[in-house]
Image (cartoon, rainbow, N blue to C red):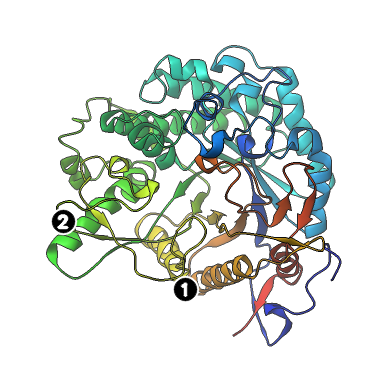
Amino acid sequence: MSNPASPPAVGVLDQGPELTFPPGFLWGAATAAYQIEGAAAEGGRTPSIWDTFSHTAGRTVAGHTGDVACDHYHRMPDDVRLMAELGLKSYRFSVSWPRVQPGGTGAANQEGLDFYRRVVDELLAHDIEPWLTLYHWDLPQPLEDAGGWPARDTAARFADYAQLVAAALGDRVRYWTTLNEPWCSAFLGYGSGVHAPGRSDGGDAVRAGHHLMLGHGLAVQALRAARPDAQLGITLNLYPVTPASDAAADVDAARRIDGLANRFFLDPVLRGSYPADLRTDLREVSDFGHVRDGDLTIISSPLDVVGINYYSRHVVAAPVEGAEPEAYWRSPSCWPGSEDVRFVTRGVPVTDMDWEIDAPGLVETLERVHREYTDLPLYVTENGSAFVDTVVDGQVDDPDRLAYFDAHLRAAHAAISAGVPLKGYFAWSLMDNFEWAWGYTKRFGMVHVDYDSQARIPKSSARWYAEVIRRNGLAAQ
């Protein structure tokens, strides 16, 4: 077997002319604090909603928690060296709000900030661009106890937290993401309840979505004031939504789900308005009375970049009485006002998450955002797949994940060729980690993690990705 740090002997890149990416294309990988850090009660960190949720019986698979996770808090220098060995040009990580500001209010916890200072310093020492995400779902528990994201005050607290992080790290961090996937925070956390904090109320989900975006806008303003030279953005998880047929009812079902999945966030952030049809769809759930004068101006504060997380496509159909959802993220309670829309499976290959593999959907998504919403630089801030991995003779061969990355990078190249200003790609994820409600049963990483020994093994997909980065391209097919 080859050395884990070396490129594979045979692979997609070994033949033919290359599809070259633009000079300066930013190649990276991404993680999230609660999924990898561990040290849940060390260094002044206090509980987040995910600590509470994962410690509540029945909320996660087998009762798994992020208490230890990948122990990145203690192993960070070695993990950064591994990133450098893979040739990463950038690393997208999130800051744990309750590690930096225990309780979600008041002064910063300097021990927590010192950890992220070390992260940034270590990255820069290895010529890896830090890409900082302020919020990847770990709301301090006291803020949830005070109402959580459905409460307007949480948005103001988020802006205060952004100021604390900017004061500590703004001199060395150029790229900032305010929120990661606010759809998940709002509609999985407060709608279906399958994510923390585990509440199930459509009206709360709608209010949470708005206040997340309000917090985003306030944070952008705070960051802009503190660091005028920073590159500021948000990361949205977007899906192409396709009707199951040309029937008018299926087309309308697709319109409704597109409204909730995509336009609920794209329109306020990039147009400063909510779509009229979305308001109508939600009339039985919310009267939008929580939207105050001036909110949408704040939410649409000018950005420098837009991050897009892409995993799959939604294919939907009109309601059929008695139809049941097929997966937790298709749960009716994720879609207030459109609970009866059916999500259709097409019999195409899926990942271990049961998500259909649809690389052309990435092209559609990138082209749509560029065509309909913005000329800003776009970045794929997450893209990846979970598959079952096996360690054999100290190696992990993951051809399905490698093929997934290859297909989606070809899609990214096609989007660039079509004129999309795509400037970078972050693989999800750097390493196997705590996969939220699925605990440690789903592996997305390019690097295998043995959760007992914490040993890291780069998989064949990691070695392949390192070669893609080195050559800044893919072999033409």
In the rendered structure, which amino acid carries the disc numbered 2? Val
**Residue 109, quarter of picture:** top right
Task: Check the image and report above or below for 179 versus 258.
Answer: above
Quarter of the image for residue 3 reads bottom right
Q: Where in the figure is residue 161, as x and y percent of width and height? A: 57, 23
User: Between tags 2 and 1, which lies in front?
Assistant: 2
Residue at numbered disc 1: 418
Q: Residue furthest top?
A: 106
Residue 89 in sight in this render: yes
**Position of residue 121 in the picture relative to residue 202 (left or right):** right
Q: Amino acid at mark 1?
A: Ala
Q: Residues within 10 Å of mark 2 (few under 14, many from 20)?
A: few
Q: Which residue carries the number 2 mark?
A: 320
Residue 339: give x, y in percent of width and height.
23, 45
Q: Is residue 215 above or below residue 370?
A: above
Whether pointer 2 and pointer 1 mark residues with C-beta atoms closer than 8 Å, the reply is: no
Instruction: Name the quarter where the N terminus is drawn.
Output: bottom right
**Residue 111 placement, left or right of 138:** right
What residue appears at the point 66 percent right and 58 percent down from the top-left corner?
26
Q: Which mark is residue 217?
A: none
Q: Nearer the viewer, residue 45 or 225?
A: 45
Q: Is residue 135 visible?
A: no
Residue 382, x across and y down, in percent:
55, 53
